Image (cartoon, grey):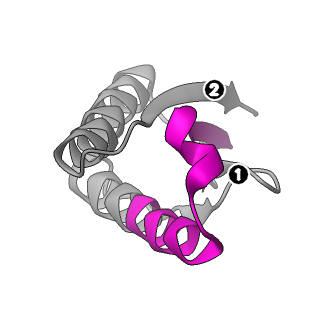
Amino acid sequence: MSYLKFEIDGPLKKELSPREIDILQTTFLNLAAMTNALITGKGVMLNPPDEGKLGVTLAFSEKLLSKKENELSEALLKKINNFLQMSKLELSAHLTNSIKVK
């Protein structure tokens, strides 16, 4: 199995309403699904990260090749950060965890 965990943080996060958080969370999950389909073509389980955090966790049933994992991580970070920048939101995304399990 492979796991990739992305979190979004920044000064604006404290000012977001629950509705805005839900909208952003849905956007991040959709960006992750689309990016994964384009790059890996493999099935993935998508979830928000731990309670109270903004972002997305991708869980693959099989190990990803390092090349594909790097490509997916870079592409998803770029898409999320571009979205945040174009939306004029003072937030940024970062990869917090990458785990491969046999």
Q: Tell me if 16 is positioned left or right of 73 in this view.
A: right
| Image x and y of residue 47, in percent | 64, 63
Q: Tell me if 36 is positioned left or right of 5 in this view.
A: left
- For residue 94, above or below residue 38: above
Identify the element where label 2 is drawn: strand
Query: In this figure, which residue is indicated by the disc labeled 1?
Result: 49
Q: Residue furthest front?
A: 15
Screen quadrant of the C terminus: top right
Q: Are marks 2 and 1 in contact (CB under 8 Å)?
A: yes
Q: Amino acid at mark 1?
A: Pro
Which is nearer the N-term, disc 2 or disc 1?
1
Question: Which mark, by number, is residue 96?
Answer: 2
Task: Decide which of 82, 91 is in the foreground and name it.
Answer: 91
| Image x and y of residue 84, in percent | 30, 45
Residue sitting at x 43%, y 58%: 28
Residue sitting at x 26%, y 33%: 78
